[in-house]
Amino acid sequence: MKHVVVVGAGLGGLTAGALLAKEGYSVTILEQHTVVGGCATTFKRKGGYTCEVGLHEMDAVYGDRVKETFASLGVYEHVTFVQPDAFYHIATDELAFTMPHDREAAIEKLVLTFPHEKKAILEYFGLLETITREFEQLMTASWWQYAMFPFVFRHILKYRTTSTKTLMERLFKDETLKLILNANVGYYSDKVENLSFLLHSLAQHSYYSGGGWYIKGGSQKFSDHLASVVRQHGGEVITKATVTQIEAHAVTYMHKKQTITIESDIVISNLAPAATYALADIPYHEKRQPASSILTIYIGFKHNLKTVYGEKPYASFFFKGIHDIEAYDAMLDSAIEERGFGFTDYSQIDSGLTSDPDKSFGVILTTDFLVEWQDLSKEAYEQKKAMLLERFLDKLELEYPNIREYIEFAEVATAKTIQRYIKTPNGTAYGFAPTPEQFFRIPQVKSKKRENLYFVGAWVMGGGFSPTIMSGKICYEQICTT
């Protein structure tokens, strides 16, 4: 029986470890944090609050990309998924628009609102579907399809270096429509001009075709279930285990002040390639740039917001003073407090995040960059967080009058916070920046520098739940067929 050591218990490592353990491999997962999951975690606060770190919506929970994996690992029997009523809501000075999850409903509403753009809207949704279909073919392509790449995958080839902003400018004339279609760009990237249209197509189509879903009780439930599958099949999941060295057939880690070395036939790393090769003492230079980060404000409300304010959107984006995607991108060059923001109101769904049904939980989020925090003293860092909390609560009160009255606790997490907990470059949860230049690559899960070394996670296919889970599945398949 081959022994597999997984370094890092993000969703990629947990998925690969669970699938391999179920297949009969001896699996040990080593995680430096106190809990598994990477950013797919929660934490507790007084008052009965479970604070969601990573997930607002997971795409296509019952779609073809993850259905087989979830069924195999018993996810549907042990994890409850809740679907919000809509994809997202966007509000600016001039408009308020709620985007449906369903593709046909979204097209119908957009055409009704922008009849002069009907042809472009239909072409846009057709492109999302076509590009997704070509990528699905590419994942299982035979040699002759690769040989005929320009013909079989012509849309991938055509748009491989196209930014989402470039496509928007080519296809649409209405600036408001462009902004609506990119309201949730922060799910994937910072600026619209920095986002590969191929990734935009894959991600948005997945939501439109399969809906968005939340894990009841928080994403930790999902991560913990994957860890339980490893343990049920004889594997180990060890937290507070900091890996210090990766050798050809052994991994050394620190745990409870002890240095422990375990033998390994195969090593799977959930870390960034540069960090992995540094542990393996293998020369490596990374040319690709890491993605941006997120500023998050976690808020516990002593009253249920749905009871106080009635039915409101679950996931909203508020862009005051922003009229088009040009202004949106320019906004990200301004100070953090000047940026638009998203607000997820978990009271609008059966989230399971509070022990008291009369309370609720919510999250404010906006794009963040580690460089904005790096050189601050501890005092200046805390002062800046306090200032941002007040500024964003001021903005939230414009949408939810007197909301401060209902706040029991609120705390700010920055790019520096994320880096402290998951040790990623730039404090990112998204892996490499999904720019047109960096996004389109065949997923490389097998190392070219060491025979028995594999990679999973956001650094393989991109950030988010589905891509990291899929990286784990691909890694599992490659190991089983080698």
Image (cartoon, grey):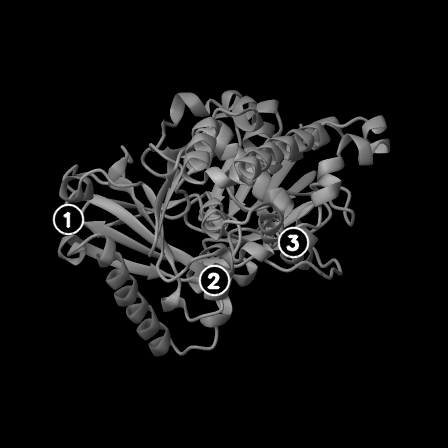
Visible residue check, residue 86: yes
- Residue at image point 45% right, 59% down: 367
**Residue 395 location, quadrant:** bottom left
Q: Position of residue 175 (x, y in %)?
A: 49, 52
Dot label at residue 276: 3
Residue marked by disc 1: 302
Q: Earlier in the sequence, mark 3 or mark 1?
A: 3
Q: At numbered mark 2, what does the secondary structure look like: helix, strand or loop?
A: helix
**Could you tell me if the residues under marks 3 and 1 are in contact, i.e. CB atoms within 8 Å?**
no
> Residue type at mark 2?
Ala
For marks 2 and 1, give the CA distance: 36 Å
- Which amino acid, by three-letter code, is at mark 3? Thr
Above or below: residue 254 compared with residue 1: below
Q: Secondary structure at mark 3?
A: helix
Mark 3 or mark 1, whichever is nearer to me: 1
Q: Residue 56 versus residue 482: which sits nearer the camera?
A: 56
Give the number of the mark in front: 2 or 1. Answer: 2
Mark 2, residue position: 327
Quadrant into which the N terminus falls:
top right
Crowding near pointer 3: few (<14 within 10 Å), some, many (20+)?
A: many
